[in-house]
Amino acid sequence: MPDRDLTRAYGRAQFVAKLRRLADAIESEAPFTIQVAGERLRIPASAVFNIEHERSGDRQELEFQLLWPADGD
């Protein structure tokens, strides 16, 4: 698989719906599937979760991250 790093903006309702589906999958310890810029991703239930905060000058960024091996398990 080639390397990839992109950001996709969503409207509030779309973002909330995606977060809600993700939260439901995490809570039920189930895999989560999402499509980002045409690529379908399957995040296994064993994914590691972290939250990252960055501050630089007058900007701040908060990222909710899910990390899993490239082979999906």
Image (cartoon, grey):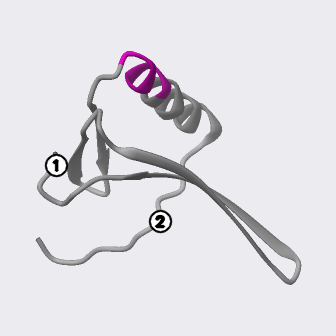
Q: Is residue 35 above or below residue 20?
A: below
Separation (CA) of disc 2 from disc 1: 21 Å
Q: Amino acid at mark 1?
A: Gly
Instruction: Write down the residue under mark 2.
Output: 7
Q: State which quarter of the image contains the N terminus.
A: bottom left
User: Magenta includes 14?
Assistant: no
View extreme (bottom): residue: 57
Q: Above or below — where is 40 with respect to 25?
A: below
Residue closest to the eye, 52 or 60: 52
- Kindly report which numbered mark, 2 or 1, lies closer to the viewer in this rendering: 1
Q: Is residue 1 left or right of residue 55?
A: left
Residue at (29, 38) in percent of width and height: 46
Q: Amino acid at mark 2?
A: Thr
Quarter containing the C terminus? top left
Q: Which residues are magenta?
A: 23-28
In the picture, the disc for residue 72 is 1
Crowding around mark 1 (Cα neighbors within 10 Å: few <14, some 14 to 19, many 20+) is few
Instruction: Specify the farthest residue to the top.
Output: 28
Q: Secondary structure at mark 2?
A: loop
Q: Earlier in the sequence, mark 2 or mark 1?
A: 2
Determine if the magenta segment contains residue 26. yes
Q: Position of residue 2 (x, y in %)?
A: 15, 77
